[in-house]
């Protein structure tokens, strides 16, 4: 039987209360939402928090997907099932629906949250790649108030994020620009498994030219892989299959997959390239349809 | 800590450690052993119950998190000797052999049909993708849920009458 080590439990009644509890209880206290990453870690003794602060009652404060004019704001406690079902999100960033259809399984998606997924910072986690591709920013609150951090600065290392002791991730913000298209491509061994590799792409097309682009890979590095060199190549050029082939070649070069039960290194590099090209093609098709 | 959880409409109270998982709370305290404890890692789906009408994995949920919520287990499906249409469907279509995955499959199916009374085969297969069955190859489980969808309107009217 797998059971977590002992801990004290309390339920938060407000975000301010969470910040106060974290300050009072110190760095061994952890916040729990869906619990589908933290509880398995605790069962394996990879995490042994002294206290758990349950934030599930904070849905009124922390669960929402809304258009704030120029940006879409997503509360950290928004569950995968709600991200999957959101027409607002699908309209502006279909990459979220692509990813949510293949994140874990529907029963897990009823509990897991976007904030939990991002804070777990597992390199194979899909939403970290999605948020990197769409150039999301995250809002982090602590005793000194709140700060906003870009995804590149959010991922500090494997399972480590910019969220410091005493702080809480409260919101994900997605900037809206015209001509956007986005897509997520994932290959997994079986339904609900982690990716062998996955690629997220977002593209912003202006008069048949790639004005801006974001590409990120999951499961082929120690953290989410942000393909800056491929983005640089694409910017300012008209989208084409040949160009995406070149971006795919860069993806295969710039990732650093580990061989494991999901496949050897060369296969994963090949897959990263193939999925990058597919994601870019699909994102572009969506962007161009949107323009017409 | 003292916990009170609404399980199948009954308030169940006991002292338990905060680390008690919902699956063990359900099986130990009211003794409702219909909910199975399987892989312990949220992969197999044998432990699926409903929380406020949504299917959840009770091996990856703390009992303490369920205070103030309504938990429904497989024992709640049969009412007054009348099987729920999903149970009847599993019977009609021979959707189990060893039966270990069955409580989770039944609760997942019930949650699906509550939300989507006429699912396509693809929707059924997606809905049960969080459950593992090593006997049936899933074919008969899908057929059973289809049977339940087709027959539940009539079955419900019968119960009401």
Image (spheres, helix red, strand yellow):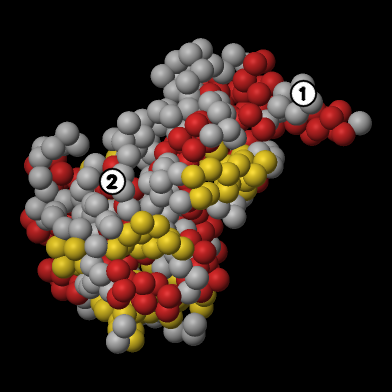
Q: Is mark 1 on a helix, strand or loop?
A: loop
Residue A160, disc = none
B146 or A252: nearer the viewer: B146
Query: Up-down: is B81 above or below B63?
Result: above
The CA span between labels 1 and 2 is 42 Å
Q: Residue at x 41, y 49 (%)?
A: B18
Determine if residue B146 is in view: no
Q: Mark 2 points at which residue?
A: A5
Residue A118 picture quarter: bottom left
Query: Up-down: is A273 above or below A181?
Result: above
Q: Tell me if A209 is positioned left or right of B155 in this view.
A: left
Q: Tell me if B128 is positioned left or right of A160 in this view.
A: right
Q: Where is residue B136 in the image (x, y as percent from the top left)?
A: 48, 17
- Residue at the farthest right position: B161
A277 or B48: nearer the viewer: B48
Q: Is mark 2 on a helix, strand or loop?
A: loop
Q: Residue at x 47, y 41 (%)?
A: B22
Q: Where is residue A1 in the image (x, y as percent from the top left)?
A: 32, 31
Disc 1 packing (10 Å; few <14; some 14–19; many ≥20): few
Q: Position of residue A126 (x, y in %)?
A: 31, 55
Q: Nearer the viewer, mark 1 or mark 2?
A: 2
Q: Position of residue B35 (x, y in %)?
A: 52, 30
Residue A286 picture quarter: bottom left
Q: Residue at x 71, y 27 (%)?
A: B78
Residue B82, disc = 1
Determine if residue A181 is in view: yes
A202 or B85: nearer the viewer: B85
Q: Mark 2 lies on which chain?
A: A
A117 or B30: nearer the viewer: B30
Q: In which quarter of the image is the C terminus of chain B?
A: top right
């Amino acid at each position: 039987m797998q059971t977590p080590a002992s801990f004290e439990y309390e339920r938060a009644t407000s975000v301010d209360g969470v910040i106060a509890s974290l300050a009072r209880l110190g760095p061994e206290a952890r916040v729990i939402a869906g619990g589908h990453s933290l509880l398995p870690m605790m069962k394996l003794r990879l995490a042994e928090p002294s206290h758990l602060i349950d934030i599930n009652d904070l849905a009124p404060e922390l669960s929402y997907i809304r258009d704030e004019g120029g940006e879409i704001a997503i509360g950290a406690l928004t569950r995968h099932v709600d991200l999957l079902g959101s027409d607002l999100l699908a309209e502006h960033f279909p990459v979220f629906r692509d990813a949510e259809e293949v994140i874990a399984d529907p029963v897990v998606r009823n509990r897991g949250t976007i904030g939990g997924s991002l804070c777990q910072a597992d390199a194979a986690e899909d939403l970290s790649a999605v948020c990197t591709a769409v150039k999301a920013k995250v809002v982090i609150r602590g005793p000194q108030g709140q700060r906003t951090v870009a995804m590149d600065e959010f991922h500090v290392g494997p399972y480590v994020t910019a969220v410091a002791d005493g702080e809480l991730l409260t919101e994900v913000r997605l900037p809206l620009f015209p001509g956007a298209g986005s897509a997520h491509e994932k290959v997994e061994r079986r339904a609900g498994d982690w990716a062998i590799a996955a690629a997220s792409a977002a593209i912003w097309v202006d008069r048949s030219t790639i004005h801006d682009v974001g590409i990120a890979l999951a499961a082929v590095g120690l953290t989410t892989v942000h393909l800056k060199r491929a983005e640089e190549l694409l910017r300012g050029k008209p989208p084409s299959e040949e160009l995406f082939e070149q971006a795919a070649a860069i993806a295969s070069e710039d990732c650093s997959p580990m061989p494991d039960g999901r496949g050897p290194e060369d296969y994963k590099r090949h897959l990263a390239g193939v999925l990058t090209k597919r994601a870019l093609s699909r994102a572009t098709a969506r962007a161009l349809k949107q323009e017409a | 800590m003292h916990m009170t959880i609404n399980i199948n409409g009954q308030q169940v109270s006991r002292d338990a450690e905060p680390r008690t998982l919902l699956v063990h709370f359900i099986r130990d305290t009211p003794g409702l052993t219909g909910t199975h404890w399987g892989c312990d890692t949220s992969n197999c789906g044998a432990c699926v119950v409903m929380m406020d009408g949504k299917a959840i994995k009770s091996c990856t949920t703390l009992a303490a998190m369920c205070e103030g919520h309504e938990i429904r287990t497989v024992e709640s499906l049969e009412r007054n000797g009348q099987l729920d249409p999903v149970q009847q469907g599993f019977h009609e279509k021979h959707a189990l052999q060893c039966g270990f995955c069955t409580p989770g499959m039944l609760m997942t199916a019930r949650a699906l049909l509550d939300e989507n009374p006429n699912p396509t085969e693809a929707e059924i297969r997606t809905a049960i993708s969080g459950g593992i069955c090593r006997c049936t190859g899933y074919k008969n489980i899908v057929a059973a849920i289809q049977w339940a969808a087709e027959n539940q309107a009539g079955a419900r009217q019968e119960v009401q009458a």
